[in-house]
Image (cartoon, rainbow, N blue to C red):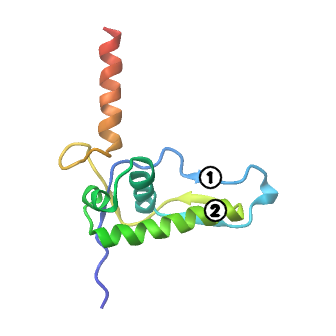
């Protein structure tokens, strides 16, 4: 019997969850990337986390992150190379609250801090 999937900690859903070719005639299918795959790409490729730091942030094992990351990169490459629409949806994840146990890659904390700075500059 397979182990049940563990929920992955995700700091925020993507603002845009659909990417693809501009002209309709170039669309040759679609690729679905899960929210946890998106989060892994964001943390490793954008935020500069290593796999161990990403695993800590997402509250899963490093080997789990490695598998998620490999799958996410393959899907992103497939969409780019073959001109497919990339959709980000679904997966095993739970949204963080931006407070307890959230690390340096949290988008909620960063957005809150940015908003706080803007309010202070207005005064």
**Disc number lying in front (2 or 1):** 2
| The C terminus lies in quadrant | top left
The residue wearing badge 1 is 19
Q: Helix, strand or loop at disc 1? A: strand
In the depicted view, which residue is nearer to us: 106 or 7? 106
Query: In the visual, does 15 lie left or right of 80?
Result: left
Q: Residue at x 47, y 63 (%)?
A: 34
What percent of the width, then of the height, locates residue 75? 56, 66
Residue at position x 45%, y 53% from top? 45
Identify which residue, 34 or 56, lies in the foreground.
56
Q: Is residue 41 left or right of residue 50?
A: right
For label 1, the crowd category at 10 Å Cα-Cα, with few meaning under 14, some 14 to 19 and many 20 or more, is: some
> Element under label 2?
helix
Total marks shown come to 2
Residue 113: image quadrant is top left
Q: Position of residue 103 (x, y in %)?
A: 25, 47
User: Foreground residue, 4 or 36?
Assistant: 36
The answer to whether the residue labelled 2 contacts the one labelled 1, judged by CB atoms less than 8 Å apart, is: yes
Provide residue 43's location: percent of width, then percent of height: 38, 52
111 over 16 or under it: above or below: above
Location of residue 58 (image quadrant): bottom left
The residue pinned by badge 2 equals: 79
| Residue positioned 32% across, 21% down in the render | 117
Around disc 2, counting alpha carbons within 10 Å, would you say few (fewer than 14), some (14 to 19), or many (20 or more)?
Answer: many
Q: Is residue 32 left or right of residue 119?
A: right
Of the two numbered discs 2 and 1 on the same chain, state the one appearing first in sequence. Answer: 1
- Which residue sits at x=36%, y=19%? 118
Residue 56, x across and y down, in percent: 24, 59
In three-dimensional space, the C-alpha distance between marks 2 and 1, rounded to whole angstroms, equals 9 Å
Seen as rendered, the residue at the extreme top is: 123
């Amino acid at each position: 019997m397979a182990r049940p999937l563990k929920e992955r900690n995700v700091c925020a859903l993507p603002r845009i969850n659909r990417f693809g070719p501009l002209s309709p005639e170039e669309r040759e299918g679609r690729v679905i990337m899960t929210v946890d795959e998106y989060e892994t790409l964001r943390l490793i490729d954008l935020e500069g986390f290593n796999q161990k730091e990403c695993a800590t942030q997402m509250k899963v094992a490093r080997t789990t992150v490695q598998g998620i990351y490999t799958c996410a990169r393959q899907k992103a490459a497939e969409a780019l190379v073959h001109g497919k629409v990339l959709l980000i949806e679904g997966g095993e994840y739970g949204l963080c609250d931006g407070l307890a146990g959230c690390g340096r890659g949290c988008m909620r904390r960063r957005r809150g801090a940015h908003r706080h700075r803007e309010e202070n500059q207005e005064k």
